[in-house]
Image: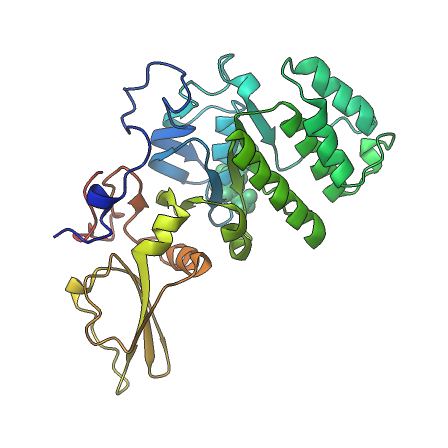
Amino acid sequence: MNHPLDPSAAHQHDGPYDSGSYGDDAPGASPALEAVGLGFRGRDEWALRGGDFAVPRGRVVGLVGPNGSGKTALLTVAAGLRPVDAGTLRVLGHAPGTPAVLPRVGVLLQDRPLERGFTVAETLRLGRALNPGWSEAAARAIIDDCDIPPRARVGRLSAGQRTCVALALALGKEPELLLLDEPMADLDPQRRLALTGVLMKRAAEHGTTIVMSSHALSELHLVCDHVLLMARGRVLLADDTEFVEAAHSLMTFTCPDAATPAIPPQMGTVIETRRSGRVLSVLVRFPLTTDGAASTAAPSLEEILLAYLRNPQAAPLIAGRFTAKAPASGSPDPQDRPAR
Ligand SMILES: Nc1ncnc2c1ncn2[C@@H]1O[C@H](COP(=O)(O)OP(=O)(O)OP(=O)(O)O)[C@@H](O)[C@H]1O
């Protein structure tokens, strides 16, 4: 049965989703990132296995997952700094790290690798020397916004100021794709807000695709319009935030006694049930009925993300793909949708 929100009928993304179909580099011809069977090994087990998703160009993507779920691994593979352990990742239609794509990708790594003996001005001069498409204005705007004296030595800056310098280097490249590993982590609230503004302006004015990992779930809806959530080795969400929000409903049921009522399978795809006293809250994807519910509300993006993080066995919601692959212990989700 088709749900009104079922994207196979109603929600189409721009561009095809077929890993073999992108022959050229015209804008929009290929996704910003496209993963097929992507895998990274962690220390003891696979951090990600069989990852299939595509990030359309021009999105600001929140990359979300618990510690060790492979966010940094994904960003460093996309930057061409490490190989995949399984599958493929295409970046702007090309293999990561190749000359066709390297100059078009800006990266902010978690440890912000910078030459500590250089001044800020020398660091930017190096950026200009190494990048043919360098924009001094784009780099300077960040340095000025963050009030960093150009003559200051990088090694004497605070962690947040070093983040600003590393970001200036990444933006000075005028990249089509910006990969940011926890860009907000070291920044004070004012600079977080300023950076949010810079990133949104960048995306709106230049169509830059931005992929940023973050644990600050309550702030993601302010800057991101697409979400990629990974947990326990699987990609659980990969879609536009607007669609993810519209696809979920938070219902409450009153429990008359100590027993928790069974949720009828025809309700939709149940992601999470939580009981507090006599109230049972149920987060449902593609709800088909609200029969018996005491209330129905639209959950926030943060509530949805938290529900998936707490329930990593949930059936995935991945744009353009039917991926109701449940882990061995779970069962495939019959309510999930077919490919769009
Ligand atoms: N240098 C390394 N060599 C081998 N495995 C590593 C290395 N660094 C990280 N790992 C492992 O790779 C897996 C993914 O780590 P990754 O750093 O990508 O996670 P993350 O989602 O970015 O975590 P966090 O939220 O803590 O930054 C983890 O199991 C981690 O232990």
Q: Position of residue 248 (x, y in %)?
A: 32, 58
Foreground residue among 170 and 243 = 243
Furthest toward the left, the residue is 1
Find residue 60 and report its horizontal and vertical position in percent: 49, 39
Colour scheme in use: rainbow
Going by the picture, which residue comes out furthest to the front?
205
Residue 296 position, x and y percent, is 31, 70
Q: Is residue 340 left or right of residue 149?
A: left
Residue under the point 25% across and 48% down: 326
Q: Nearer the viewer, residue 232 or 134?
A: 134
Identify the image quadrant of the C terminus. top left
> Which residue is depicted at the point 79% across and 43% down?
158
Along the horizontal axis of the image, is 270 left or right of 222? left
Apparent side of residue 27 relative to residue 126 in the rendered image (left or right): left
Return the residue found at the far right.
151
Q: Position of residue 208 (x, y in %)?
A: 52, 31
Residue shown at the point (27%, 82%) measured from the top left: 255
Can residue 133 be seen in the rendering of this structure? Answer: yes
Give me the residue at 84% from left, 30% from top.
150
Asked which quadrant contains residue 310, the reply is bottom left
